[in-house]
Amino acid sequence: MTTENEPKTQPAESQVPAKAEEKPKVEKHNPRIFVYDGREFSDPDPKMTTDEVRQYYATFFPELANAEVLAAVARDSKTAPGTREDVTEFRRRTGTKG
């Protein structure tokens, strides 16, 4: 039982220091575009690695399963002026049958 003469055990709300909200650091990356056979494809998931994207598109284009990946090149965006996008090209490997 508390009486009016006893001190309050909890500080008033104004006396509680405000906690700084920690925001996770998000690195901004350029949007990725993937090119195969002269056609551009969007990024299915920005969290996927380039190799995972290649395997994803190999379900539609089986020849991509063994395709080589050319380095990403930054270019001005065609759809969003003033921004850049990273373009990665998939190229079929040439070989011999047999």
Image (tube, helix red, strand yellow):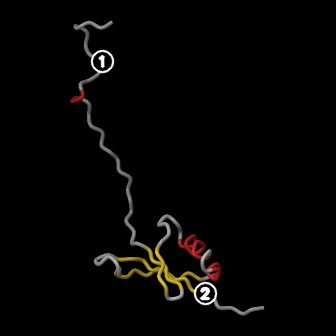
Name the amino acid type tagged 2.
Arg
Horizontal and vertical percent position of residue 65? 64, 78
Q: Is residue 98 left or right of residue 16?
A: right
Mark 1: few/some/many CA within 10 Å (<14, 14-19, 20+): few
Task: Give me the C-alpha separation between circle 2 and circle 1.
Answer: 72 Å
* Residue holding disc 1: 9
Q: Residues within 10 Å of mark 2 (few under 14, many from 20)?
A: some
Residue at the spot 39% in from the left edge and 69% down from the top edge: 29
Quadrant in which the C terminus appears: bottom right
Secondary structure under tag 2 reads loop
Q: Amino acid at mark 1?
A: Thr
Which residue occupies 26% across, 16% down? 8
Q: How many marks?
A: 2
| Residue 26 % position (x, y) | 38, 59
Mark nearer the N terminus (2 vs 1): 1
Marker disc for residue 92 = 2
Quadrant of the frame with the N terminus: top left
Left or right: residue 81 versus residue 90 is: left
Write the residue at 27% across / 37% down. 18
Secondary structure at numbered mark 1: loop
Within the image, what quadrant is residue 63 found in?
bottom right
Q: Position of residue 80 (x, y in %)?
A: 32, 76
